[in-house]
Amino acid sequence: MIRDDPITFELVKNGLSAIVDEMALTMVRTAYSANLKKPMDLSTAFCATDGQLLAQGLTLPLHLGSIPDALAAVRARYGNAIRPGDVFILNDPYEGGTHLPDLFVIEPVFVPVLMHENLLEGVDGHGEHRLAGFVATCAHHSDIGGRVAGGNACDSTEIYQEGLRIPPLRLYDRGTPDEALFRLLEANVRVPVMVLGDLRAQLAACHIGKAGLHQLVTRYGLRTLEGHFRALLDHTERLARAAIARWPDGRYTFTDFIDVDGIDAEPIPITVAIIVDGDTLVADFTGTAPQVKGAINSPLPFTKSAVYACVRCLMEPDIPNNEGYFRPIRVRAPAGTVVNPVLPAPVAARGLTGFRLANVLMGALAQLAPEQVPAAEVGGDTGITFGGYDARRRPFVFLEFLFGSWGRRPDRDGVDGNSSIVRSLLEQPDRNRGGRAAAPD
């Protein structure tokens, strides 16, 4: 029984973490762009057959809640037509994505039925193979076409100006690349060598993830692994509920403002109410501004990721980074608002709103755990893109994001030159220092 085998449980848990971290390192080492190699604007994950996130690499927290939405969009579109050798791609913010420069590459992992004689019965297979899960990657690409180099402009007024919009599609069909899709992507970006190079880095990471899972299946068998997958999610849920249950019940509200969206001169309020009730937590954004004309609207997966990341900062350091800790957390974000826009709202610079969400959420969470939450961080980033043509008319794009600082922690000074809490690497929080352990002294 799973509950009687804690050693194997720990080995499987840490094995999954090692797989997704190796995927992330593969992307960093094989990527072409500085944006993936330096700030690691990427994410890697492994998900169960039902789409639940089981492990995510030590990369961007803001992708934590996004990968399950991207995989859900793929599964909704293709259902039972997912086959060995398929690879899927998407970036559509209105069908699983967050903004157009973020390309999600998702690959199902099938294992030979003969790898273990005790496989689950009654599950549809594909010939001699059975679905064991999904490996997923997300990477912020240097360009995705559109009216402005880099695809990150804040002054677009509709999604159609922002670049090539890709719904969930097969990039590979049973092992065969879709040459038409590759050519379409190549023709619509300014720096195709860099974009296709980074895309191949994502494919390489998926290959590493598949190989790692095959090793786990060979060692433990799929039936045993699936039992531990369920146990891992349930274990994480119990830890998360226990953490929330220790916080005082109540309703904690906070409002912050973005000055303008770059188009209209009106301030943009972002309001959240954190409601703790026993072992559950609700983040309610009712009262937040309607979606704006400028491209700072935050799609719902991005907003949910900010909530999960901020709440995670207050939990015990040994809680795994998987979907189990999402279960006691609910996010209410009214459609048509700046934190849950609807078509045709532009979203390219949604990062600015996502980082301001960290301030808003931490402002509310500070009321229930003042000894853990640092003062407000800078509350946004500055995205700089240089694009143009050299003397030989060859296009170039340079992308860089500049950040400021974190506020003072409960027992020491703030930190200069650090990215947002929700953009920092997925390291564990340090309860003795407040904020995250990633912050240097």
Image (cartoon, helix red, strand yellow):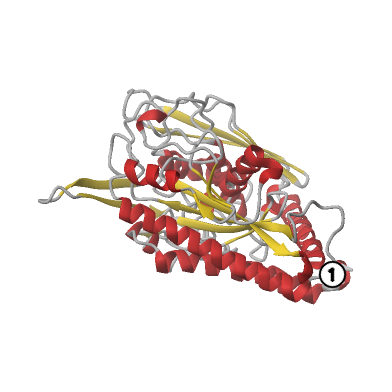
Residue in front for this viewpoint, 232 or 25: 25
Left or right: residue 400 compared with residue 314:
left
Residue in front for this viewpoint, 308 or 346: 346
Q: Name the quadrant containing residue 112.
A: bottom right
The quarter of the rendered structure image containing the C terminus is bottom left
**Which residue sits at x=41%, y=69%?**
29
**Which residue sits at x=57%, y=35%?**
272
Q: Amino acid at mark 1?
A: Glu
Left or right: residue 61 compared with residue 418:
right
Residue annotated with mark 1: 117
Q: Name the quadrant containing residue 297.
A: top left
The quarter of the rendered structure image containing the N terminus is bottom right
**Which residue sits at x=84%, y=59%?**
120
Residue 195 seen in this snapshot: yes
Left or right: residue 35 compared with residue 410:
left
Residue in front for this viewpoint, 110 or 42: 110
Residue 58 seen in this snapshot: no
Q: Residues within 10 Å of mark 1 (few under 14, many from 20)?
A: few
Q: Position of residue 248 (x, y in %)?
A: 72, 46
Q: Secondary structure at mark 1?
A: loop
Q: How many marks?
A: 1
Q: Position of residue 261 (x, y in %)?
A: 36, 30
Q: Residue furthest left?
A: 391
Q: Position of residue 9 (x, y in %)?
A: 77, 70
